[in-house]
Amino acid sequence: MSSLVYHAATRVLQNFLDEKGSLKHLVYNTTPEAVADRRKYIFKIVFSTVKWKPVLEAIFEEVRDSLGTERTKEGTAADKLKQIVSREKVEAGAFIYTFELLLSSDKRGRRALEKQISKHGEVGRVIFDDSVRGRLEDAVERVRVKKGVESVEELISKEIAEIDASRNSVPVYMRVNGLVTSTGEFEKTLVESKEFRLVREEGEGGAGAGGGEADMDEECGHLRDSLHVVLRSDVRVRPGLFARDRDVGGLYVFAPGVLGMGGVVGFGSAMVGEMRVVVQDKASCFPARVLLPPLGGKAVDFCAAPGNKTLQLVEMVGEAGSVVAFERDGRRAGLLRKRLLEGGCFVEGVEGKGKKEGGRENGRKGGRVRVCERDVLGVEWCDPVVREVEWGLLDPSCSGSGMRRTVETVLRGGGEREGGEAGQAEAERVSRLAGLQLRLLRHVAEFPSLRVLVYSTCSVHEKENEEVVGAFLRSREAQAEGWVLRKAGESEGLKRKCEWNGRVGLKEGVGLTEEQAESVIRFSSEEHTNGFFVAKFERVGWEERRRERLREAESEWKRMESEKEEKREEGGRVGKERRREVGGRTEKGKSYGGHQPFSRKRR
């Protein structure tokens, strides 16, 4: 295998260990063009190495112990190995080459690597040196004996093994980006590629793609659920199967692993790279669909990055509408703006922190969006930026407890935390997040024109979901402004009535009545999605309140601006008086405000 591939894999692993991004992002966005056609293989190398990292660390510990009692001659392979796997820092390449040498199941690839190892860097040559190989093999055996397992494969932790196996039961969801293409074009491209067939359920219309549909009644054992048909299919068999989602328009379901198979919809494909489709979990598509701002509407995404939901809103309001997207972090705001441009939006200049306002840049086509680099909690209710928005989406920071655990998150310490100090720390974190979420809801509830507000989290904790909703409904802001809870699952933005409203066995004391609990939507892994929560609020008597509230907002904003101007003028007067007290610049050698002027003496 080319040394360029392993050099790229080493850089990706190092950046991953430095927490500069996810593996997929680093592989498909930071590797050089010279190895673009090998990115799939690079991902496989790095992912496998990461999965075995705890075992590799144990192997290196054994090597360090054996080398610590041995005098090695400077410049030898053993001496270099000491430096490569030192306790201070293990070279990223050491992880990759040791995995390839000892743990990889790809024997053909290993033999090819051995033949070309002389063309690789020093780390690779040292690891594959015959004397070092013997040390590493002995270390593996000692680790196996200490762990009390019969084979090397059993060294992987049970937790990681279970997560790795669960990947085969998680479907891949792709949402067609209507700002760039259409569902008809998407289906046509897939079918004409001969790589996929469309599974359609009984009574569902054709693909509009000139054939290529797989009717479940004829070919799939009279099953009625296309999701399970696709899940049951083998991603390695071509043509593969894909289906329209039953709830979200423009969303399609594919078999697990399809993104890593390359082809027309794999990572690195034009379809994904040009954002004709967005890889987005089904549950994450629901908040915007439940909100459903109309064509020409004015919407706001209060916590917008990374931008998938914002793209949905821009598509819904169309070219006649507008979307305001808030993101308080400067770096994330920049990435959000870039993603929206690539996704086909008209993006106005980023506001705040020295950025110029009003500088309009064009995407390919689509609605207008304004990215505001501001914390929404610092935005006054009467601010012109939010004064006329009517449709609001609030998906704030949360614990992320509903997100499926991955090998990456476990190795970075993001696994489940139960009991002890870790459990207590997690409970305190969830409590702090719930407080922030409630503050945000109460704050945006006073925006004068807001008529519908959707609140969502990727959490499964009642404290961040039902308890926050209940506390908000009891708050002064909600009662004064007329906010009530509506049935999220009956939104016109969904293809059918949601069948998993509420939560079975809801605990008492969360602050919701039985009817209110049935109004929210909860997702779990049983629906083959991430854990997710969606609640929909509507303002009663909005039409009557809006006109009066807008007058109040305009008046209040003028008053605030007038006060700011007075303070600026007052500050200017104070500054002038202070300068007079200090005195102006005097002649050379004379005192200046009680101090001698700086003078440079000649040496």
Image: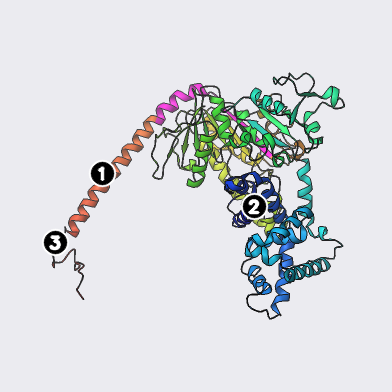
Q: Position of residue 109 (x, y in %)?
A: 75, 53
Q: Earlier in the sequence, mark 3 or mark 2?
A: 2
Residue 167, x across and y down, in percent: 76, 44
- Viewer can see residue 105: no
For the residue carrying disc 3, how many other residues have a C-alpha within 10 Å: few (<14), some (14-19), or many (20+)? few
Tag 2: residue type?
A: Val
Q: Which of marks 1 and 2 is nearer the N terminus?
A: 2
Label 1, on which residue? Answer: 569
Q: Residue 425, located in which quarter of the rendered image?
A: bottom right
Q: Nearer the viewer, mark 1 or mark 3?
A: 3
User: Magenta segment: does it hold 552?
Assistant: yes
As helix, strand or loop, the secondary structure at mark 3 comes to loop
Q: Mark 2 points at which residue?
A: 5
Q: In this view, does 317 lie above or below 331?
A: above
Q: How far apart are marks 1 and 3 (CA)?
A: 28 Å
Q: Which portion, as a residue range, is magenta? A: 532-553
Would you place residue 138 above or below residue 239 in this image?
A: below
Q: In this view, does 500 lie to the left or right of 551?
A: right
